Image (cartoon, rainbow, N blue to C red):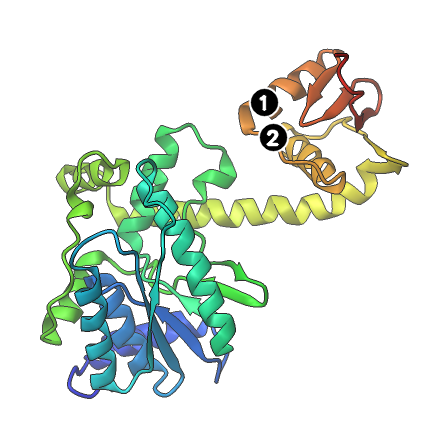
Amino acid sequence: MAQGHPLDSTSTARFVADLAALAGPGQRIGVAVSGGPDSLALLLLAHAARPGEIEAATVDHRLRDDSAAEAAMVAKVCASIGVPHSILDLHWPKPPTANLQARAREQRYILLGRWAATKRLPLVATAHHADDQAETLLMRLARGAGLSGLVATRVRRELFEGIDLIRPLLGWRKEELAGIVGKAGLTPVDDPANRDPRHDRTRMRAMLRESEWADPVRLAATANWLAEADAALDWALDRLRVDRIERDGAALSIDPDGVPPELLRRLLLAAFAELKVQAPRGPELARATAALAGGKVATLSGLKLEPGARWRLSPAPPRRG
C-alpha cells in the first residue's frame, strides 16, 4: 500500500488484475508520470500493486514556465512513497510551432525508451484510459481511417528495442482516476493545453462530455474489438503471404485471385516491406490497387506495379531527364 497515500482494496485488486495481463510476475516496470491526475493515479496504483518493482520518470518538455516545478512535484510524490524517479529534460534545438502535441509526444517516447533501456526496465506504462481511447477513436473516424487506424490506442506496442509500452488503464474512466488522486490528498498538474479548442482532442472531449449517447467505455470497448479484428487479419496474412507472394530477384509477384480487398491491401503492404521501400499512404495504395484490378500499370513508392494473373512489383526505371 502506498505509504501516506492509501488506496482502497477494490481499486488495488482491480489494477493488479489489469497489470497481470500485461506484465509477468517480478517484471520491473517504468511509469511515465506527467503530474496530471491520470498519471498520478497510475503511479499510486502501480506502487500499490508492485511495491519495489516500480520506477518513475517525468519528461520536462520545457514548453511552459511551470514545467520544471511540475516535474519537481512528481519527484516529491515519488520520494514520499519510495519510488525512484528521474526527470528527463527535453532540449529542443528550436521549439516547434506546428503539430506541437504530436512532436512533443514523439520526443517524449524517445526519451522514455532511452531511459527505460538505461534502467533495464522491460516495460513502460502510461496512463491512457477509456476516455482517451474514445476520443482517439472518434478522431480517427472523423479522418476516415481504415481498420488499423480505428484500433486507436493499443494496449501494448514496442517502445524501444527489447522494451514494450503498456497501457493498463484502458478500462478505467478518467473520473475514477481523478477520484483516486483526490482521496490521496494530491493536487495534480492542470495543463491548459487540455482545454485548448484548437486541438482536435479537446473538441472530441467536449463532445463526449455533452453527449447523451456517446459512452466512452462502450467506445473504448469498440476500439478493443477492432484491435482483435486487426490482429486476426495479421494472423491470416502471415499464412497467406507464404502462398501468395513469390520472390523473383529484385521483384515480387502476388497472386490476387479471390483474396478479399482488406487482405489484398495488406499483402501489397507486406510486399512493399519485403522490397524495403516506404509504405504508401492509404489513399495512394487504394488508387494503385484499383488500377491493377482494372488491368492498368501503376507506379508507387519507387516501384512499378504491373497487372496480370500475378501482380508484379519491381523497381521503377529512373525517369528520363
Q: Secondary structure at mark 1?
A: helix
Kindly identify the residue that appears in the image at 65 percent across and 16 percent down: 290
Instruction: Give the position of the C terminus as an image quadrant.
Output: top right
Kindly identify the residue that appears in the image at 37 percent across and 44 percent down: 102
Badge 2: few (under 14), some or many (20 or more) residues near its Cα, within 10 Å? Answer: some
Is residue 39 visible to the viewer in this orientation of the structure?
yes
**Circle 2: residue type:** Pro
Q: Where residue 170 appears, x then y in whole percent? A: 34, 58
Is residue 122 visible to the viewer in this orientation of the structure?
no
Say the numbered circle drawn on residue 217: none
Q: How many marks?
A: 2
**Circle 1: residue type:** Glu
Up/down of 156 relative to 264, above or below: below
Instruction: Give the position of the N terminus as an image quadrant.
Output: bottom left
Name the residue carrying label 2.
280
- Viewer-side residue, 293 vs 68: 68
How far apart marks 2 and 1 lie (CA) works out to: 6 Å
In this rendering, position of residue 26 left or right of residue 49: right
Kindly identify the residue that appears in the image at 29 percent across and 69 percent down: 42
Q: Where residue 126 appears, x then y in whole percent? A: 36, 63
Badge 1: few (under 14), some or many (20 or more) residues near its Cα, within 10 Å? Answer: few
Up/down of 231 relative to 142, above or below: below
Say the numbered circle drawn on residue 284: 1
Residue contact between numbered discs 2 and 1, judged by CB atoms under 8 Å? yes
